[in-house]
């Protein structure tokens, strides 16, 4: 889903919807979201197209797609790279099946009637009922944190979970837990102590984010698994269920490894394929994203990323911890290849109209046709550099620092090359057809 703050930092996206009634009033409470994504799934015996509401946010109907899982060979211990001078990353096993390159994606699954989706190696031990989650014990809560975010450009809040990797406050979570956020607060479950957090880097496609807690020291970390994962293993998913502010523990078992599933499109977000995932059955709900998937020794084998809703048996997916830690190491190394982004984006503060529109052809056929040359501004966010420079809805941006802009996507690409604090000279055509110029100093945008 692309929210208004995504539009603000990515000017080729669609403008925000008109404010709802609750957003009109200054004293209205922000909307609360517990983060989990949806996926359409073809179950073993039936295909479903489901929709729903999570934390008051309507969900589109999902398209039915297939999942598969294949059991991997036994895992071998493999020490991950260090995380700089401050602390070293805990050891983790090598990736199941696909090796270190088998990286996952994100999503919330929508399974069928409780049977295992797809084929391949999976457990047939799934019962007709599922144990409800209970309050997490001290051992289960060790190193697991509660994450709350403010989505300042959308008058909303979101909640999820994270795991402490180092005593000085490096925290691992899903990118979709913190994306679009303008403020991040992390709470230690055992003490209630809270910290502000900064995004060090993210991998949007693989749904991994690394945070740094401000001023943290002496924290207790999670313990990484050292002996691998197999189908049938008992597991416990620990997370901030429904954003309730209390860690809950959902017991279950592994039903597949190296699993694949395709997410459904949601709003303007395209579908994605999740690969190399741990598939398990447990009572996982929205808000558990980013939480620890523990084995029977209390060691982390994965990061909960996806779960079904509205079914008697919940099917869930977790990113194998070794895959997540490999991305963490890449972020710490400052390597922005393969989809990794460091820090925060620069923001201009505009939403841009679509580069194309649909034209009706003879016979009822349709075709995409280009619109006006340049990037047409459809919305300008208050208090942003675009507003200060004098841009208004209806203007068409034609150049940035003298480089011609032919479309909204070109504008987005150009702005990607700038950092917060950089000044840019904008050229645009106003509603009267006159050419205008102005200078904008880009600010820090929401987390990607």
Image (cartoon, rainbow, N blue to C red):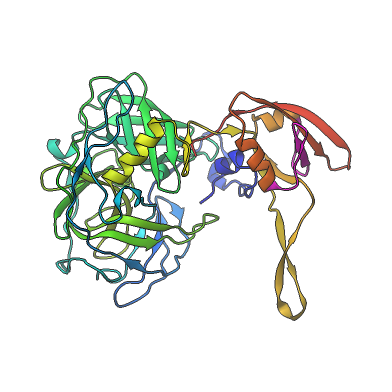
Picture coordinates of residue 357, whole percent (x, y) = 72, 60
- Whether residue 115 is situated above or below residue 434 in the rendered picture: below
**In this rendering, would 140 be left or right of 435?**
left
Residue positioned 34% across, 18% down in the render? 215
Quarter holding residue 192 = top left
**In this rendering, would 434 be left or right of 140?**
right
Q: Give the range drawn in magenta.
A: 390-408
Q: Is residue 401 magenta-colored?
A: yes
Question: Does the image show residue 30?
Answer: no
Picture coordinates of residue 178, whole percent (x, y) = 42, 39
Picture coordinates of residue 391, whole percent (x, y) = 75, 35
In the image, 265 versus 406, the foreground residue is 406
**In this rendering, would 28 be left or right of 220?**
right
Quarter holding residue 161 = top left
Q: Is residue 195 magenta-colored?
A: no
In the image, 104 versus 52, the foreground residue is 104
């Amino acid at each position: 889903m692309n929210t208004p703050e995504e539009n603000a930092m990515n000017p080729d996206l669609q403008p925000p919807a008109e404010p709802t009634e609750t957003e009109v009033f200054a004293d209205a409470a922000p909307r609360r979201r517990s983060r989990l994504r949806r996926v359409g799934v073809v179950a073993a015996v039936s295909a479903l197209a489901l929709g729903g509401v999570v934390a008051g946010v309507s969900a589109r109907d999902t398209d039915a797609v297939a999942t598969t899982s294949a059991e991997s060979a036994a895992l071998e211990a493999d020490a991950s790279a260090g995380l700089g001078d401050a602390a070293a990353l805990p050891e983790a096993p090598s990736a199941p099946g696909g090796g270190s390159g088998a990286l996952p994606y994100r999503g919330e699954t929508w399974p069928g009637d409780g049977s295992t989706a797809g084929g391949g190696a999976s457990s047939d031990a799934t019962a007709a009922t599922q144990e409800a989650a209970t309050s997490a014990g001290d051992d289960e809560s060790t190193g697991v944190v509660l994450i709350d975010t403010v989505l300042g450009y959308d008058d909303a809040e979101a909640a999820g979970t994270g795991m402490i990797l180092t005593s000085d406050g490096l925290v691992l979570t899903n990118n979709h837990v913190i994306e679009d956020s303008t403020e991040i607060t992390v709470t230690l479950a055992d003490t209630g102590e809270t910290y502000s957090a900064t995004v060090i880097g993210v991998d949007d496609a693989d749904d991994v984010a690394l945070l740094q807690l401000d001023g943290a020291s002496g924290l207790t970390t999670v313990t990484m698994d050292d002996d691998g994962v197999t189908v049938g293993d008992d597991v416990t998913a620990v997370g901030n269920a429904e954003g309730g502010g209390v860690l809950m523990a959902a017991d279950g078992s592994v039903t597949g490894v190296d699993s694949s599933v395709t997410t459904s499109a949601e709003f303007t977000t395209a579908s994605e394929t999740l690969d190399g995932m741990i598939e398990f059955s447990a009572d996982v709900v929205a808000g558990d994203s980013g939480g620890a998937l523990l084995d029977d020794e209390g060691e982390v084998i994965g990061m909960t990323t996806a779960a079904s809703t509205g079914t008697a048996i919940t099917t869930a997916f977790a990113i194998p911890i070794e895959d997540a830690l490999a991305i963490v190491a890449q972020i710490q190394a400052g390597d922005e290849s393969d989809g990794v982004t460091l820090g925060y984006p620069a923001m201009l503060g505009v939403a841009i109209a679509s580069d194309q529109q649909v034209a009706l052809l003879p016979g009822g056929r349709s075709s995409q046709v280009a619109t006006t040359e340049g990037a047409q501004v459809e919305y300008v966010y208050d208090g942003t550099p675009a507003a200060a420079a004098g841009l208004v809805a209806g203007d068409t941006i034609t150049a940035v620092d003298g480089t011609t802009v032919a479309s909204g996507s070109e504008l987005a690409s150009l702005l990607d090359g700038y950092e917060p604090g950089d000044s840019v000279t904008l050229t645009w055509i106003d509603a009267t057809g006159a050419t205008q110029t102005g200078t904008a100093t880009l600010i820090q945008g929401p987390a990607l």
